[in-house]
Amino acid sequence: MTVRIVTDSSADLPADLVQQHGITVLPCYVVVDDQTFKDGVEINADDFYRHLQAEGRTPTTAQPTVADFQEVYRELTGQGDQVVSIHVSGKLSGTLNSAEQAKASIDAAQIEIIDSQLASIPLGLAVLDAAITAAEGGNYHDIADKVRQGLGTHHGYFALDTLVYLQKGGRIGKAQAFMGSILSVKPILKLQNGEPHPVERPRNSERAMRRLAELTKELAPVRRLAVIHSTNPERMAVLKEQLTGLVPADQIIEARFGSTLGTYIGPEALGVAVTQ
Amino acid sequence: MNQLRGQDLKEAFSTATGFLEEHRDVVNALNVFPVPDGDTGTNMLLTMRSAIQSASEDCPDGENHSVGAVSSALAQGAFFGARGNSGVILSQFLKGFSDALADKEFLAADDLTLAFKLASAAAYESVGNPVEGTMLTVIRMASEAVQGSDSDLPGLWEVAYQASQDALAGTPEQLPVLKEAGVVDAGGLGVVILIGGALRSIAENGSSGVELPELSRFKGTANASGSPIKAEFLDTTLEQEWGYCTQFIINSVDGRDLDIGQVRTHFQGTALSTVVVGYQRNVRVHVHLEETGPALSYAESLGAVSDVKIESMDNQNERFASSSHSGVVALAVLSVVQGEGLAHLFRDSGCAGVIEGGQTMNPSVRQIIDAARSTNAVDVIVLPNNGNVVLAAEQAAAAEPSMHVVPTKSVPQGVTALLAYNPEGTWEENVAAMTAVLSEVASVEVTAAVRGVTIGGLEVEEGQHIGLLEGKLVSSEDSSEKALMAALELTDLSSDAIVSLYYGADSSAADAQQVADGLEAKFPGIQVDLIDGKQHHHQYLASVE
């Protein structure tokens, strides 16, 4: 009996880590110019951001379907495995609903579903933690309990170029307070209670990056650290440079906002996630 | 006339207000800096009008009233009608004056000496850092003169009037900036006019005997135009310190009067950021403390304690949780700004309320309180955005414990403070964060000189454009763009500086863009943000951070 970890593509986990830890990732859907793509499978990030910044209809996203979940859950449980399925915050997406319905449709399936209250690479770190815990042994209830207990140790800060995409996508929430458009600010947001919250309004991207590093350092000591970008790997490299004191450089995970997150976070965004 | 009845006192203040109205433009024209602001005369006049209106309502004509009742009504009206720093000080003067007369049916000579004494003390207490050479000095010297006099009542007013004029004439010797500009203090002149006006009503020989004497005596010599000048008013940088905020009201029991001075003295010795206001029956205390227990024990030893509000993180969170169901928000920011463009900017950047006013139109304490209430927030942070509105905002906050002031003295400072605001923080966290960033920003204002003057070796001709850095005159040029550049070049424009340039209604986007391009070329690496402020009076406002 093995406990298998399932998540969705909004976790923005790099492919090598997914493979290394045997994690199953269900792709979310992104709708670009009336065409539906599986996030990370049928559309890559470069193409997606090109569409996002082009004139035309704003991309939208959709959760994996119940059928998608049924297929994955049947396959894994059919092999006799147990499943811990960890997903994007229920306040941001209906992914959990699909998962729950799929689970209910499968008799006697040994599946635990967890609302991570997270999104993007902070969710990725929670999933990674779960995979490592699962590898150490224990049944799916034990693993799920440990994952739930550990959810408060994963944190993320995001420096956006603009809140326009978050607003267009209907996920602005509490960050609405920073929505002003006259002054050019680069808002920093964090995830709290499953949704984005406003943190600060630096006046330019240089200061935003500096503050991102400072805010992250306030979370030290950290066990795991990830940096993430949407369209600017060079700036992410600079950010990473500023954070090497927290964990050795070769242990810092580098990730990219996929098209699901990119729909809301927009181009020129940077982020940091830590596990304390 | 050896004593005044209530109606006589009302008449005296009414005459004084009329006298001030006559001479308001003279007071308004007194500016150290030739900028179109100040309006000290208008501010004092509007404060007095509010006092008179309150007295007319509470103590109608044609009836007998005690001087206690009349002076109390005057003080109440002035408190809520106070505008600008001069208005706030004037209102506190009236508060002290009325405290001395609280139980008096008539005003006799020895009552007047006490009234002046308390009025002077109250005026000084109202200001964080009293500055000599201002209206405070004029008030104090008038008060001191009557203390030693054995004249009858009209004689005492005469003594006060003379002393106030001497004090006013001496203000340039006390405040270097006045001397340099060759002027006397505007608020001080306002006080002289009010005392003289009252004397018109009280003097035995009737009103015609008192004129505002020798205004030429006070006129500046440095200014070519010959128009009189006045001081940039008090620089009231109130030091703010932070701790646990404790607010409560002490109510007198068994008819025993409370000693507000004793309460204030007690808390000044034991707490930070002390504000103690009120009357004999109720004293409102707002202090910042590490431990609240001893403060409340002390308060309970004096009377019945009510309306206790102790701010802590947990309480704030609870209030937020409970308020989110009632349409009330936990926290809001209220700004005082002039002009549609700036009002839009402040709203866009997260201000729940905007009061129209600032440079030439200072809002009253009452207006600030009303606007704060209309935000429907449990706590309101007020950004005065003008040096002459700070004190009125502080007075509003003293009367309304839910209001908290971040003492921004300019629009650019206000914007910087607003950007440090996080609606999810407590008001304490926000006021601390918003106040902290004020020291990180330099403010530049550019306007047209309304007359010629020479200050600090800088010669200004009427019509020239002048640049002020942190309220101080630093440049004088033929064009507003040149004055702006000259002022900005005095700031720290190192490579990561951000310059926010708010161009006014009289400036064009193209000219502003040229300034921005010039700056970016001359100081590589800096960022210049252009904002269409549409403000009047200032061709440009700018901040450097």
Image (cartoon, grey):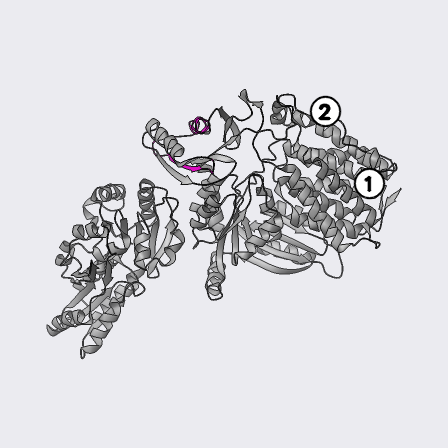
Residue B407 place in picture, x, y as percent: 53, 42
Please name the residue that numbered disc 2 is placed on.
B217
Q: Quadrant of residue A141?
A: bottom left
Residue A264 place in picture, x, y as percent: 28, 55
Residue B96 place in picture, x, y as percent: 73, 45
Residue under the image location 24 percent in, 73 percent down: A100
Q: Are marks 2 and 1 on the same chain?
A: yes
Protein chain holding label 1: B
- Between B512 and A114, the residue placed more toward the observer is B512
Protein chain holding label 2: B
Compared with residue B345, is residue A153 higher up or lower down, i.e. above or below?
below
Mark 2 / mark 1, whichever is N-terminal: 1
Identify the disc placed on residue A9. Answer: none
Q: Quadrant of the C terminus of chain B?
A: top left
- Between B289 and B475, the residue placed more toward the observer is B475
Under mark 2, the amino acid is Arg
Residue under the image location 66 percent in, 33 percent down: B186
Q: Quadrant of the N terminus of chain B?
A: top right
Kindly state the secondary structure of the residue where label 2 is placed.
Answer: helix
Kindly state the secondary structure of the residue where label 1 is placed.
Answer: helix
Asked whether residue B199 is drawn in magenta, I would say no
- Between A248 and B337, the residue placed more toward the observer is B337
Please name the residue that numbered disc 1 is placed on.
B201
Residue count near mark 1 (Cα–Cα under 10 Å), binned few <14, some 14–19, many ≥20: many
Query: Is B439 placed left or right of A262 in the picture?
Result: right
Q: Quick check: can you spot residue A162?
A: yes
